[in-house]
Image (cartoon, helix red, strand yellow):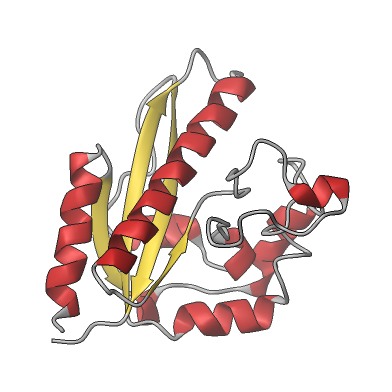
Amino acid sequence: MNTGKQAMKVREYLEKHGARVGEAAVAELRFDASFRALCEQNSCGYYGACWTCPPDAGPIGPLMEKARSYERALVFQTVFPIEDPFDIEGMHEAGRRHNRLVRKVRRKAETKKLECLALGAGACGGCKTCAKKKGEPCRHPGRALLSLEACGIDAYQMGRLAGLPLSNGANTVSFLGVLLYHHKG
């Protein structure tokens, strides 16, 4: 199977849904376990409160190893308007919308038989309230989404490598996602 063609179809899907898209070799991405420290600071409030966030996402070493096992990175960015730089609610809603797109992209890639790993921005957001908060197992493990940070990926460097702008203007919030895949044919 020509995974390059399959990845191109996923890219077209992303662009159709308003995302900016670039690509990079996974070997060029910067991985660093210290990015987990961003999660441990708990600025988003999900550390230990979401099954796909640290510490419950799993040890950083195996997650980085899994991500590094892929060859190509289809990097995408969504940009959303917010009322002002302090619109935390707007930022959270934009993050949920971004991760919904990441899940759709993963499903699209899987229907194209593309072996891949999709990573989103921040907490999974697949459920209104994560089952972790109630001490229950994940209700939708097939929908669960790991973040770039949980896997030790330098999102800033990844965006630059893919040619995506780091700033998108006043009163906007931008998020990055990635579809890591094996390139054959």
* Quadrant housing the C terminus: bottom left
Relative to 103, is 39 on the left or the right?
A: right
The mark tally for this picture is 0
Q: Where is residue 104? Give x, y as percent.
A: 37, 50
Q: Where is residue 122? Give x, y as percent.
A: 60, 49
**Which residue is depicted at the point 36% across and 26% down?**
169
**Which residue is depicted at the point 43% across and 63% down?**
118
Of 33 and 99, nearer the camera is 99
- Residue 152 image-quadrant placement: bottom right
Relative to 150, is 154 on the left or the right?
A: left
Q: Where is residue 68? Give x, y as percent.
A: 46, 82
With respect to residue 72, does 21 lie above or below?
Answer: above
**Which residue is depicted at the point 54% across and 28% down?**
93
Q: Is residue 169 visible?
A: yes
- Residue 55 image-quadrant placement: bottom right
In the picture as drawn, the residue positioned furthest to the right comes out as: 135
In the picture as drawn, the residue positioned furthest to the front comes out as: 139
* Quadrant housing the N terminus: bottom left
Relative to 153, is 5 on the left or the right?
A: left
Of 51 and 166, nearer the camera is 51
Q: Where is residue 54? Give x, y as percent.
A: 74, 61
Q: Is residue 49 visible?
A: no
**Which residue is depicted at the point 34% across and 54% down?**
105
